[in-house]
Amino acid sequence: QVQLVESGGGLVQAGASLRLSCTVAGRTGNYTLGWFRQAPGKEREFVAQISASGGATFYANSVKGRFTISRDNTKSTVYLQMNSLKPEDTAIYYCGVRIFDWSYGSGTQVTVST
């Protein structure tokens, strides 16, 4: 059973940066990894994903140019570098791994104040 543990969330002011990390354990092999987020009163939405090799990345339009997803397969870790944060980026951020379908961690809170 795969386990995902996110870290790096916090409270920052608009314009600041944060780096989220997620460690994947419990399953060998490399899979597509991603980040999702859920704001209060909204459904979980896709943020970014990265292919097993790291060679291909995809982003939601709302974060394109500000967020960067990367991975270190030697550490079984995926990162989300978030720059120029906006109040509307406030959400619980979830790491995901796609094996047959997406599985998620428990999330880390990101709060961006004005």
Image: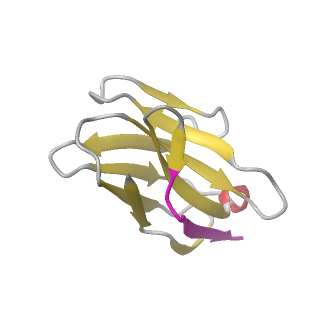
* Residue 43 placement, left or right of 49: right
Residue projecting furthest to the top:
56
Q: Is residue 107 above or below residue 10?
A: above
Principal SS element in the magenta part? strand
Residue drawn at x 57%, y 58% as measured from the top left: 93
Is residue 41 highlighted in magenta? no
Q: Is residue 41 above or below residue 70?
A: below
* Residue 20 placement, left or right of 111: left
Find residue 102 and report its horizontal and vertical position in percent. Answer: 53, 40
Find residue 107 and report its horizontal and vertical position in percent. Answer: 54, 64
For residue 66, say whether it is visible: no
Q: Which residues are magenta?
A: 104-114
Q: Is residue 74 above or below residue 38?
A: above
Find residue 39 and report its horizontal and vertical position in percent. Answer: 74, 59
Find residue 79 and report its horizontal and vertical position in percent. Answer: 37, 51
Q: Which quadrant of the structure image shows residue 112? A: bottom right
For residue 49, say whether it is visible: yes
Is residue 110 highlighted in magenta? yes
Residue projecting furthest to the left:
74
